[in-house]
Amino acid sequence: MASDQDLVVETVRDILSAHEPFALTADTAWDAGLWADLAEAGLTGVGLPEEAGGSGGELADAVAVVRTLAAGAGAVPVAEQLLAAGPALLAAGLDLPDPAEPLTLAVAGAVTAEPVDDGDGPGRWQLTGTATDVAWAGVARHVAVLAAAPEGIEGAVLALVDAEGLATSDARNLAGEPRGSLVLGGAPAAGALLTPARTGEVRARFALTRAVQLAAALERVLAWTVQYAGERHQFGRPLGRFQAVQMELAEMAGEVTAVTALTDAAVQALDRGDDVVLAAAAAKVRAGAAVEVVARLAHQVHGAIGFTHEHKLHHLTRRLWSWRDEAGSELTWSQVLGVGLLARGGDDLWPALTRVV
């Protein structure tokens, strides 16, 4: 009997198949029709509590939705909404916007927050500066911004901004997804002060969000490559019968398996309420490292056809190359991982390593 999660995944796949996301070009900012259908089905609120305006469900359900959309090249900000911005706002005690309206998270740039004493009570802030590399800038109606706290206060401010009317740039990543800047010229926002530890958790959740997407896309690229190697004949036999190709497929499978294991472990740590920073760091580093191997070998096995506009492979490899550097690069999270492990002391180093990896 199919589980509730299986039914959710099947629904997402059915909606994806009606929109043909692999037919979109790199010039397409996002798929508004896909988002509308997902929102109508309540899938843009999965994993977010019903009492907060979401659709309910577990973290695993939200991850399943994000994985399915990532593997299907869905050009919508569901990952940012379900796994990063939405949970961060709720954890900070802030109200969740209508899940039918796209929500994203901004963690880069130079944004400062100042409290506003306007009689509306605590929690009102004014944001100035520019948020950079904002996923779905110009598309998302609401943005959860991680801003610098006022001088003399440790931590950061997580503030929810209505992005309608704010100036944005039209920058995009290699896959054509919007990654512009957002100019906050004294924009009013509801916000909450976060400790340094909680600030690190917000950044780690964003990194884990990208790791989840990378893992799903890597799995799909591997599956396509194995299928192609079995169907494509050269010199009278399938490509997959050549030892050199078999070795490449095995190397790809090893990389994908490692990424999936680490990402699943990080999601489980988050679900248990454990400290997710080191687990997310390990997942993001390993996923980023796998991109170089898997994408290269996939295109090598497919040959020139994988780069053509009509072929679906490049839709995911371009996302892999883009997501690898987003929410913190491998260098950034390797440093976090190293510092975090050393801080545990010598006696706990090996147990910590085995828990993380």
Image (tube, grey):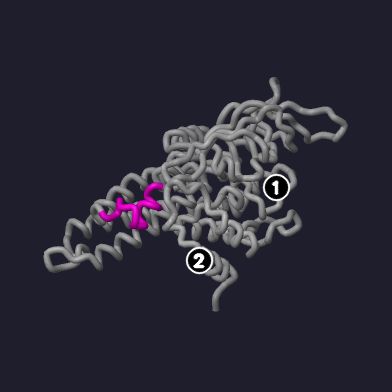
Q: Quadrant of residue 312?
A: bottom left
Q: Residue at x 39, y 47 (%)?
A: 318
**Residue that badge 1 annotates:** 90
SS for tag 1?
helix
Specify the segment rendered in magenta.
Answer: 305-318
Asked whether residue 131 appears in the rendered view, the answer is: yes
Which of pointers 2 and 1 lies earlier in the amino acid sequence?
2
Left or right of 259 on screen, residue 274? right
Give 198 or 66, whichever is nearer the viewer: 66
When the figure is inspected, residue 231 is found, relative to residue 114, above or below; the finding is: below
For the view shown, which residue lies furthest in the bottom direction? 1
> Residue 348: x, y in percent?
50, 40
- Classified by dominant secondary structure, the portion drawn in magenta counts as helix
Q: Residue at x 26, y 56 (%)?
A: 302
Q: CA distance from mark 2 to mark 1?
A: 32 Å
For the view shown, which residue lies furthest in the right direction? 119
When the figure is inspected, residue 19 is found, relative to residue 29, above or below; the finding is: below
Give 261 or 140, whichever is nearer the viewer: 140
Q: Residue at x 49, y 42 (%)?
A: 281
Q: Could you tell me the amino acid type at mark 2?
A: Ala
Q: Could you tell me the amino acid type at mark 1?
A: Leu
Q: Which mark is residue 18?
A: 2
Q: Quadrant of residue 151?
A: top right
> Residue 336: x, y in percent?
49, 35
SS for tag 2?
loop
> Residue 118: x, y in percent?
85, 29
140 within the magenta span: no
